[in-house]
Each structure stands twice: as structure tokens, then as C-alpha cells.
Image (cartoon, helix red, strand yellow):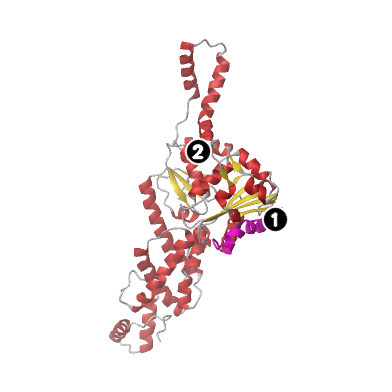
Amino acid sequence: MKNTNVIPSNLIALEWAQKFLFKNHVVNLGEASYLINTIHSSQFDKANKEYGGIQEILPIAKKIIFRFNRIAGVNLRLDSLQVNLSTHLLATYYRIKYGISYKHPDLDLIKQKYEQLFSFTRFSVRPFEEFVKKDIPDDELALIALYFGGENKAIEAENLKKQKNDVMIVCSSGIGTSRILKQQLEDRFPEVAFSKPYNTLSYENSSLEDIKLIVSTIKIKNRKGINVLKVSAIPGKEDWKNIESALKKEGLIKTKNPKMNIEGLLDIISEYARIENVNELKKALKQYIENSSTNFLNNKSKITNNSHTKLEEIFTKSNISFVDHANNFREALSLAFEPLIKNRSIETKYIDKIEYLTKKYGPYMMIEKGVLLAHAKPGDGVNKTDFSFLLLKKPVNLVNNNDSEAIKIIIGFATVDTSSHLEKLNDIMKILQNGKAMNNILSVSKKEQLLENTLIN
């Protein structure tokens, strides 16, 4: 039976080594083998596809790329990367097999600067570790990570060049909260070109070509001196003020001249009507000009009186929960996602990832006061797109025990892609922005009321 965990020896290489040594007056099979091992352990520029070693490693490289795409939420191209990665892994195989140590000079820098990239690479290379029956050292992982980082950077550079965006939007996963933010930004500033939502890995590896501002729902490091503005997924009054100020600073929106507009309006008004108090009218017009855009957009986002939606029409009856209290944030998450675990929409590791993201990035999933939109990436344990709703009678604090981060509602959602959840997510946003609906929800004292009385109208 063939042992698939051993790369077959290369007789051509052995023949070459013996001839080379013979010319130098050395006739020794051991020396020939040592020479072959040394050369094999060096970095290859390319490798013959007919060589048995490459044939063994090509399917392993394919598995590694698929695993990386799944966990990182990206779509690295298989065609060129598979061959290049296989060529590199061939040399890695020999270094590990013959105990030849490699030291990466920038290991600490890579682990620090590209933390996620390094972590995703460690997860992805498991099929190769099973093949060599050893764990891959961090120095070797750093080399492999550069392949993924380079490919991802090339793809994102192409995307940026095609899209010609001014502002990049970033969140931890590239789905959910950042898509809500993108829609609101485009509504409010239609003259600005906003990017698709980027996850943190894509941000770290993007060229940032032509990007003038980065708006993020999580705390991220500045790159290339580009200003990073951290805001909520549903920005508040202060957030909008900061966003507008940053866009003006970068010259992406024009600075209004209220004085000129007011004087022009006064000229028109005075043609047809008598003005009794010019100063008060100026103040009123100025206030109107400053707030007109905001008021228009706020009115646009309100749910009309003709809209009627019950909570169970969005979440389904079995996915809605009501409990008196949870002992801690983790327990609250488990309660919220319990229906999705039962119907196998998600695996337990999905909840683990949400808890980890909250600890790492803080309350960025809080989209309204007391409301958490709990989610992670499709590759974090999602089997099918699904939503859940949990109302806590007594609020629970997030991981930092900060009262300002107390949660009463957890909306859990899991999605298998970047689009199948958007329609329902839009319905959920309408509920959260409807004062009457939220008052109905927060005033109930049992699940039956949550199902029957929470009518959006």
C-alpha cells in the first residue's frame, strides 16, 4: 500500500548529484543524499509539475487555500496561488523532514502587524501538518502567511482600482454592521464614493490606493497616515457630526455657506412679503439650512403607518426567547443562540467567536442603546442563514461590566454569505428605529406578549 505521507525520491536528482560529485572526485552515496536534501530544502522559484513531490502537495495546497478562504471570509484565487504555494511547501517539507531550521528575520513584526493573517494561516495549514506529521514552526508559518497576504493584497488592489472609492468601510467580518453603516452613509452623502465593507484582514492587506478616509465600526490601526474614524453601526448625532467634519476635511463634501444661502433667501422673501424681525428670521433660516438634510433623512428612514409587522414574522416563533435574567454575557449569548444551535443553523464555536470578538473589539456590535446585533463570519461555524431574538427582563453587562454597555436585547444572526440576510436585516433596522415598536417590546413581561402585542405600525 502506498504511503501518501512520504514524497517519493527523485532518481533524476540522485543521478545529477552523483555526477556532480564524481566531477569533483567524490564518490559517496551519503554525500549525494546530503547534497540533494540541502538543495531540496532551499527555496524554489518553480518546480516541475511532473515531479512526484509536487503531485503529492498540490491537493494539500488546495485544501489549505479553501480553509483560509473559509475562515478569513475572502476569495483568494486558486489557479496561480495553488502552484506557488505548493512550490513553497515542497521546500518546507524537506526542511521539516530533515530538521533544517529556518529563522525568519521579521517574525515578531509579522505576528504583531498581521495578527489575523498569522492566526488564519495557522488554522489553514493543518492539512499540511497532518501530511508531515509535525507542527509547523512559527518561522515557517510567517513565510506561508506572506503568500496569503500577497495574494489578498493583489486582489484588493484590483478592487480598489476598479471601484475608485474615496472612503473605506471596515468591520470585523465585512458583513452585518458595516453593511448597515454603508447604506446609511450612502443615503446621507450620495456624492461620496464608499467602498464595499472590508473585514480586518482585507483592510490590513489592502493597498489603500486613492483612499482618503477610513470609517470603521471597530478599533483598527492607522495605515499609511490615513485617518481612521470609529463610529457606531447606526451612528448617533455626535457620530454624524464627526463623519461630516472628516469628509469636509478631506474635501469629499463641500462646506456649506449658510450666510450666503440665508441672504439669498431673505432677498427672495423681501420681494413678496414684509419682514418684521430680520434677525429672528435669519436665525430660523440658519437652523433650517443646517438641519434640513438630517431631518429629511430621518423622516425617510421612519416606518410608515401602513407597515404592519409582527416580531414572529421576522424571527419565527421558535427563535424568539424571553428570560428574566442571565448571570453573565456568555450565558446571555448562549440563550440567544440556543434556537439556532437546536436547529443546527450554527455550531457552538460561532458563539465562542462572538464572545472573543466582543472581548477584543469592545461593544461595536451594539447598534442601539441596549441592543446587540451578535454575529461573526460565515466561516466561524455557520451552516445556514438564520436569526434569533432574545429579550432580557433584567439587562446584562458586556464583558467589561460597564453599565453603559448593558444589554436588554440580543439579536443573533448567522449568514452563509454576504447577501442572503440583508432583507431581514433591513426589517430589523426598521423595528429598532421605530419608537413605538421598541416601547412595546421593552414593556412586555412574558413571551406571549412579545409574540402577540409587538405590532409595528
Identify the residue position indicated by label 1 in the image. Answer: 326
User: In the depicted view, which residue is nearer to us: 372 or 56?
Assistant: 372
CA distance separating discs 2 and 1:
40 Å
The residue at the point 47 percent across, 58 percent down is 73
What SS does tag 1 mark? Answer: loop
- Magenta region: which residues? 327-348
Can residue 163 be seen?
yes
Q: Position of residue 90 (x, y in %)?
A: 39, 74
Q: Where is residue 206 in the image (x, y as percent from the top left)?
A: 43, 53
Q: Is residue 295 magenta?
A: no
> Mark 2 Cα within 10 Å, few/some/many (few <14, many 20+)?
many
Q: Is residue 326 above or below residue 36?
A: above
User: In the depicted view, which residue is nearer to us: 448 or 230?
Assistant: 448
Question: What amino acid is labelled 2 in the image?
Answer: Ala
Question: What amino acid is labelled 1 in the image?
Answer: Ala
Q: Where is residue 20 in the image (x, y as percent from the top left)?
A: 29, 83
Looking at the image, is mark 2 or mark 1 earlier in the sequence?
2
367 lies left or right of 72: right
Can residue 406 be seen?
no
Q: Quadrant of the C terminus?
A: top right
- Label 1 near label 2: C-beta < 8 Å? no
What SS does tag 2 mark? Answer: helix
User: In the depicted view, which residue is nearer to us: 141 or 445?
Assistant: 445
Q: Quadrant of the N terminus?
A: bottom left
Secondary structure of the magenta portion, mostly?
A: helix
**In the drawing, what numbered circle is on residue 246?**
2
Q: Is residue 90 above or below residue 300?
A: below
314 lies left or right of 326: left
The residue at the point 31 percent across, 86 percent down is 18
Q: Where is residue 377 in the image (x, y as percent from the top left)?
A: 51, 57
